[in-house]
Amino acid sequence: MADWSTRVLSAEQKLQIEEAIAKAELLTNAEMVPMIVRRSSEAHESIRGFVLGTLLGLMTSYVLAEFFALHGYAYLIPGLGALGFFASYSPSFARLLVGSTERRRAAEIRAELEFSRLKISRTKDRVGILLFVSEFDHQVVVLADEAIAKVLDSGTWSEVCSMIILGLKTGTFSSRIIEAIGKMGNLCAVAFPPKSVNINEIENHIIVKD
């Protein structure tokens, strides 16, 4: 498990989540794959952090030179630029730099990429579901394979996403994702009931990546 994830997920909690997946899949033919990543993308936060820091340095240097005759403070420009860059790695600061719309789009792009990498569409009946969580960005995306997507649209999962985001914000991630997985099982149970022989086509693991 990646070191950063220990802030939100212990080894014991990881096992509890995997037990929740197995329990939820008893109700349905769907295959659920929860995944948590550190962040969706670093590009926007880093660039904007550097730009913001540099602008702050320019303004501060101008004020010091213009009003206080302190011309030797030009080093504030690169200094604050660098400070802004490193501050962008603070979750709270980064979320201020990049709006929720852009963070959402970055999470959607990363989720689509991981859906393909993990080959979630390999299930026989096309009933795989990726539950993608970006911890740094406070974003959650649910991507369902074509059989499920035809019956349950993206709006179906809004409560699931809200549960997990609340968990990230309040430090209750493990209990919230367990609750969300149970909710997903119930949502899928009616349209996609378990088969008489309910083969587990995807291992019941939570995937942790940077």
Image (cartoon, rainbow, N blue to C red):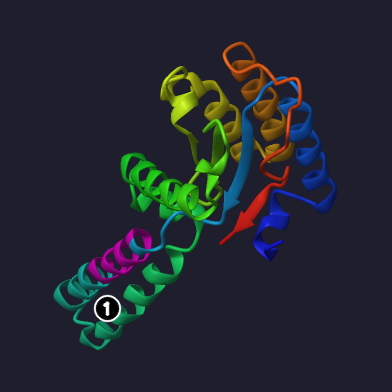
- Image quarter in which the N terminus is found: bottom right
**In the image, residue 140 lies at what x, y percent?**
50, 38
Q: Nearer the viewer, residue 27 or 135?
A: 27
Seen as rendered, the residue at the extreme left is 66
**In the image, residue 117 lies at what x, y percent?**
49, 55
Name the chief secondary structure element in magenta. helix
Residue numbers of the magenta segment: 44-56
Instruction: Check disc 1: other Cα within 10 Å, few if <14, some if 14-19, many if 20+.
Output: many
Residue under pointer 1: 77
Q: Residue visible at 21% across and 72% down?
A: 58
Seen as rendered, the residue at the extreme right is 12
Q: Nearer the viewer, residue 7 or 150?
A: 150
Q: Residue visible at 70% across and 21% down?
A: 195
**In the image, residue 194 lies at what x, y percent?**
70, 20
Q: Residue visible at 62% across and 28% down?
A: 30
Q: Is residue 90 above or below residue 23?
A: below
Residue 100 painted magenta: no
Q: Is residue 1 above or below residue 106?
A: below
Mark 1 lies on a secondary structure that is helix
- Image quarter in which the C terminus is found: bottom right
Q: Is residue 165 above or below residue 78?
A: above
Q: Label 1 is placed on what type of residue?
A: Ile
